[in-house]
Each structure stands twice: as C-alpha cells, then as structure tokens.
Image (spheres, rainbow, N blue to C red):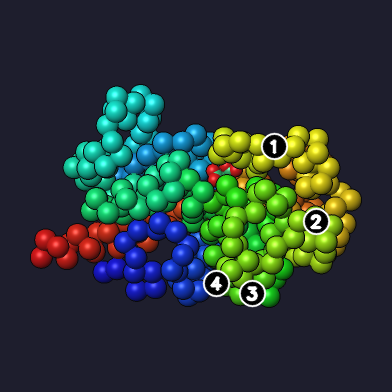
C-alpha cells in the first residue's frame, strides 16, 4: 500500500507538497536521526531493493548522503559515473533513463545541470525518482534537511524569520527553501546584490533586501548560499573582496540578527567569499555540520517512503 501520508511516486520538488506531507517526512526523518546516532545503524527496510545514484554534476555530500542512506536501509546501491558512461559517448538523457529503467531499479536519485531535466527523466521510467538538484530549479532533500535542522533547534518553522543570503539567482537550494518555508508558515527574506535577485521573486511572497545589515535585523535564521561561479554566464559580482565586504557573513553583520540566530550553509562553502571562517566555525551558532548529519536521515526517510509507494504502484499494475 502507498503511504497514505505521502502518496507520491517521486520527489521532484517541494512545489505542490502540503504542510502535512512535509511534516510527515520530517517526523520520519527525526526517527532516523535517532537511529543514526545509535549503535546499530543498519536496517532492512530496503533489503533486496536497488537504488541508483545518477549524477550528471559534481557532488560530494549529496551523493555520499544518498548512498549512505540507502546502505543503512539495506539496499543495493549503484553509483553511475556519468563521465565514464555512455553519456560521455553521446547517449541522451532519455536513453540513459530507459536503459537504467530496464534493469528494474527501485529508486533513481538524479542530479542534472538543466532545470526540468529530472522531471523529463521521471516521466520515462517506472521506478521512483528523487531530484538531487536540477539546474537552478529545485533541490528538495536539501530544503527538507534544512527544515529538519531548524525544526529540531527552534521547535517549529511557523512564525520564524529566515534570511536567505547571496547568490539566490542561481540557487535551487534557495528556491526549494522558499517554497518549503513559506508553505510551513515561516517568513522569508532574501538578501542579495541586485544582479543576483531573480526577477519577480517578490511575487512568491518573500521580502527582498539589498543591504545585509537591514535584511539581517532580528532574523532567527541566517542561511548563506555559495556564490555559484559555474552557473554564471557573465560577470555578476565585481570582485570577491567587494562581495565579501557587502554580502559576506561576518561577526559584525551577524550582530544584527537575533542573539540566538542560527547560521546555515548547504555547502560547499567559499570561505572568505560568502562567509567568514570565524562565524562558519562558531559551533555555538553554526549548524552547518548538523545539516550534513541530518541530510542522511532525511534521505533515508525519502527513500523508504518512495520505495514503498513504488512497490505498491507496480504491484497494482501486475494485478
Ligand atoms: C548545493 C547544490 O548542489 O545545489 N549543494 C548541496 O547540495 N549541498 C549548493 C551549492 O552547490 O552551492
């Protein structure tokens, strides 16, 4: 039977999820946090199942985290090395998907540099698909792990004031976070130079600031973003020095936020560009390592629910 609290076949984005569905994934993730902190750390929830990590873009933590999550659930895991596969020989995304699908995996975890590519792929396969980041569109498991980190530290999401700062224009992390945080009743500010603010973002219901000191005033959460040079076609920032001076998080700018505000970053960090090591490594306030830890738990929850749903869907088809 499909999980009635999260009946979806895929997790392609946060868009369209209800607060109850998000809470369900977070509750399940919470259980896996305790599990991962325990002695045993191995379950049979996905015994006999296969997950495939198909990454068309570089990744350290996300791919490792999906892999570890699947292994802890007892699944078999395949990591597709895209550079050495047929993709390098010119096989299209869809051909790759159809080929992998013919081998009957249960879940495909996919990262791709083009927005929308993961959805395209999901339409061609009959296994479950998790979006591990598509272009500057969505990165749902990152938003879920960020939400779990906040919820565990602050006890809630609703009513909190969250500042998302930096290269919002190129950031799928920012987009998935707006969608999730606004759905859960948080207030969201973005703080960025004009060149890195997406058009019409204010229509999504976020407040926009171009000044860090003004934008950080009284916030509960300071979420920094990496300056994504690889996605920039042209020049968006004058220089690293200039960027750090106005938009880099340091002790002085942080003093505008609430005294108990948390510092977050999805990684990888550019120290000295968007964040000063002094605040990144302040373990009273920085929860950056905890985000990585909780990422495994969130991915375990997502894999478990989707594998269950996928099985129910395919049994339904045979019957
Ligand atoms: C993010 C990503 O790849 O979108 N990183 C991650 O998943 N931990 C953010 C980034 O690359 O800056």
Of discs 2 and 4, which sits in the foreground?
2
Q: Residue 80: percent from the left, percent from the top?
A: 36, 33
Quick one: label 2 or label 4, which is nearer the N terminus?
4
Disc 2 marks which residue?
A: 211
Quick one: label 2 or label 1, which is nearer the N terminus?
2
Q: Residue 317: percent from the left, percent from the top?
A: 14, 62
Quick one: label 3 or label 4, which is nearer the N terminus?
3
Query: Judging from the image, what secondary structure is the residue with disc 4 in?
Result: helix
Q: CA distance from mark 1 to mark 3?
A: 30 Å
Disc 1 marks which residue?
A: 270
Quarter of the image where ligand 1 sits: top right
For this view, does 247 lie left or right of residue 21? Answer: right
Q: CA distance from mark 2 to mark 1?
A: 20 Å
Disc 4 marks which residue?
A: 183
Q: Are marks 3 and 4 in contact (CB under 8 Å)?
A: no
Q: CA distance from mark 3 to mark 4?
A: 9 Å
Query: Judging from the image, what secondary structure is the residue with disc 2 in?
Result: loop
Q: CA distance from mark 4 to mark 1?
A: 30 Å
Q: Which mark is residue 174?
A: none
Of discs 3 and 4, which sits in the foreground?
4
Q: Residues within 10 Å of mark 2 (few under 14, many from 20)?
A: some
Q: Residues within 10 Å of mark 4 (few under 14, many from 20)?
A: some
Q: Residue 40: percent from the left, percent from the top?
A: 49, 49
């Amino acid at each position: 039977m499909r999980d009635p609290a999260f009946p979806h076949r895929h997790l392609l984005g946060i868009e369209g999820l209800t607060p109850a569905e998000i809470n369900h994934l977070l509750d399940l993730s919470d259980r896996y946090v305790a599990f991962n902190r325990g002695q045993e750390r191995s379950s049979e929830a996905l015994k006999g199942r296969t997950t495939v990590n198909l990454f068309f873009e570089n990744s350290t933590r996300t791919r490792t985290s999906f892999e570890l999550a699947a292994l802890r659930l007892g699944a078999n895991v395949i990591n597709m090395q895209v550079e050495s596969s047929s993709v390098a020989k010119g096989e299209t995304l869809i051909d790759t998907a159809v080929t992998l699908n013919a081998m009957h995996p249960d879940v495909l975890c996919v990262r791709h540099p083009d927005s929308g590519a993961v959805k395209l792929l999901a339409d061609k396969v009959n296994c479950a698909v998790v979006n591990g980041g598509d272009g500057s569109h969505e990165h749902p498991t990152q938003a879920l792990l960020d939400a779990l980190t906040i919820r565990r530290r602050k006890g809630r999401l609703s009513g909190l004031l969250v500042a998302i700062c930096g290269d919002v224009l190129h950031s799928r992390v920012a987009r998935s976070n707006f969608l999730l945080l606004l759905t859960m009743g948080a207030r969201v500010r973005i703080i960025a130079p004009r060149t890195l603010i997406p058009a019409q973002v204010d229509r999504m219901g976020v407040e926009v600031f171009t000044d860090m000191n003004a934008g950080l005033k009284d916030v509960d959460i300071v979420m920094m973003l990496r300056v994504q040079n690889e996605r920039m076609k042209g020049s968006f920032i004058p220089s690293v020095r200039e960027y750090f001076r106005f938009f880099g998080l340091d002790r002085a700018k942080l003093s505008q936020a609430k005294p108990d505000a948390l510092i977050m970053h999805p990684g990888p960090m550019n120290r000295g560009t968007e964040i000063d090591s002094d605040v990144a490594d302040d373990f009273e306030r920085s929860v950056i390592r905890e985000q990585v830890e909780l990422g495994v738990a969130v991915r375990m929850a997502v894999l478990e629910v989707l594998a269950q749903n996928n099985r129910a869907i395919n049994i339904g088809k045979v019957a």
